[in-house]
Amino acid sequence: MKLNIAVLAGDGIGPEIVTQAQKVLDAIAAKYHHEIIYSPALVGATAIDQLGDPYPETTHEVCMNSDAVLFGAIGDPKFDNDPKAKVRPEQGLLAMRKKLGLYANIRPVATFPSLLDKSPLRLDIVEGADMVVVRELTGGIYFGEKGRSEDLKKAFDTCTYTTEEIERILKLAFSYAGKRDKRLTVVDKANVLATSRLWRETAQAMEPAYKDIEVDYMFVDNAAMQLIQWPKKFDVIVTENMFGDIISDEASVITGSLGLLPSASVGVHTSVFEPIHGSYPQAAGKDIANPVATVLSAAMLLESLDLLEEAQLVREAVNKSLEEGIVTEDINKEKPYKTSEVGDWLAKYI
Amino acid sequence: MKLNIAVLAGDGIGPEIVTQAQKVLDAIAAKYHHEIIYSPALVGATAIDQLGDPYPETTHEVCMNSDAVLFGAIGDPKFDNDPKAKVRPEQGLLAMRKKLGLYANIRPVATFPSLLDKSPLRLDIVEGADMVVVRELTGGIYFGEKGRSEDLKKAFDTCTYTTEEIERILKLAFSYAGKRDKRLTVVDKANVLATSRLWRETAQAMEPAYKDIEVDYMFVDNAAMQLIQWPKKFDVIVTENMFGDIISDEASVITGSLGLLPSASVGVHTSVFEPIHGSYPQAAGKDIANPVATVLSAAMLLESLDLLEEAQLVREAVNKSLEEGIVTEDINKEKPYKTSEVGDWLAKYI
Ligand SMILES: CC(C)[C@H](C(=O)O)[C@@H](O)C(=O)O
Ligand SMILES: CC(C)[C@H](C(=O)O)[C@@H](O)C(=O)O
């Protein structure tokens, strides 16, 4: 198979972790006789510095012509400390989501036995937790009309959703649930919001078509509590953009493996695969960042192209590396391996 | 002093827990020579059943004429299972907030040594956590324009905030921080929302007037993570209505003492004091519900009327009862006391 992969390494540790994922993909290609063509492109602060735009048109074209996008991370402290900056790296992210139609963000949250002691939760609460959070990514209050009154003393944001938008993402969520433990939790605030009531009605109307899936509905405040109290009760969670931003981040810290968690943003034109951790600027260029989340994102990429055996082998390699202690300093301070060494080990294993 | 207290016991366990708080208030009144006049009024499912309205006008008048409102809980499963119910108990809550101008919900979240083993978090993470969450309660997406397109296929909600609304609640939050550890965290989503940018600008403009308070700004997704990872780092958190709904509930479970946490909703006309737990219908009428959260809400009530010594004595009584194991079955299954016994013990201690 021939794969066209756009590589958007981005800022901070982005380039070095993406390089490790490419090593792993190259090893897979060699073993299974695939051909991979990488097309690098600029994004984030790096793209602002060079082209004045965090998601330049040239980058968009590279993505549109790809089978999948491998993404590093974006964000640079120099923008955080400058509230007057007109263009910010995050705008690139939002523009990319909208232009590529990345309507669903998928985050599998699993525990890794060797990392359980890093979880802030008690072992008995968290052990065995295994869920997927499906977040709507191109609608809601993120992209609705927003602004300021003329005297600047009043601001507004609008949250909108259409039945089609909701159906599209629910379909995906139902299908994930079907491949897993067949339980779907729809998170909303239907006791307050009109958009949430549309979500709930739409989900209820779809239920009969998925008779094997057990659906339950949970208010977002309650979900925020239960995620901490009983994380094991969740299988697939689906929710709208803003709630998903909060709930998926909350879910990602309960296992203690934040640095290892991958994500996929499924799109109309192509899909984007990226670690959920950020650009970690303090570690940039030091060869100490943990590449595993990016490598596991590459596994999700392979899976999305139906290369299931390949994806499975990448995961096996990662599990082996964790078992054998081939890990970066965030996991083992006493005997840390370098970012590049972990990448080499994984490629070699494959 | 003469105190006019409106008593809105509500549904489920509401009546029995409010009765215990009244016992405690009576004991305080006897000891400190205050006179308390209680005016009971209907609210919630009970008010729907009797008057067709979860927050009837008569109840509103009782509240308007009170120095403070002691509130139990509302909610009845018969409404949850009936999506077509036109009036729901929660609407009473929202109407009460709006009509009484309850613009700030205050939730102190503290750990109780005797309950730490009930926390879902690891002891070293949670021990010593002590924060106050200040949530804006009458603005934002809860009360903005909302609705459905004519073909019903599109829904919208509007979030609005004015500088005055934001200043009012920030002032309160700054003052809480001033009385505590002098640290204030403003939680928003200023990288995406126009209303959040107004919040941030307003807070930044107020900072110079509170030189002794250290202010930091945190995106809501990040706050949802840090609450679990490092709960001890927070002192006072302030945020808008929807984020506050999620963040305050999340904060309330980390200590394991959900059943013990009180709240105050500070209003323009009067203020409302209530436990943060719900109406717990399964336990209603069984004399097993934990009255401590309501009793501690009564302590906040006394404090709001500047009866500081009285409030302190109520808290001391509660701490003593916990130490001596005078607790309901949710805390000690082996040797549980009844709701009424805990109330009697507390009143007697005082
Ligand atoms: C950077 C920000 C705009 C973004 C979001 O809120 O979606 C981020 O938090 C995320 O979750 O990817
Ligand atoms: C019942 C509901 C409308 C309410 C809210 O969202 O404000 C509740 O969750 C709360 O936090 O008091």
Image (cartoon, coloured by chain):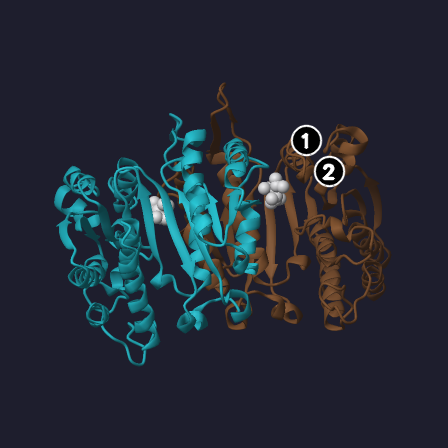
Chain colours: A brown, B cyan
Does residue A42 appear left or right of residue A99 in this picture? right
Label 1 element class? loop
Q: How many marks?
A: 2
The percent position of residue B55, horizontal first and vertical second, equals 21, 41
Q: Which mark is residue A85?
A: 1
**As rendered, which of B301 and A173 lies closer to the eye?**
B301
Give the CA separation, mark 1 to mark 2: 14 Å
Contact between labelled residues 2 and 1, with CB atoms less than 8 Å apart: no
| Quadrant holding the C terminus of chain A | bottom right
Q: Which mark is residue B332?
A: none
Residue for badge 2: A44
Q: Residue furthest bottom?
A: B334
Question: Which dot, 1 or 2, sits closer to the camera?
Answer: 1
Up-down relation of residue B213 to residue B336 (above or below):
above
* Residue A199 shows in the view: no
Label 2 element class? loop
**As rendered, which of A116 and A135 lies closer to the eye?**
A116
Picture quadrant of residue A250: bottom right
Q: Image point 45% across, 40% down: which residue?
A: B170
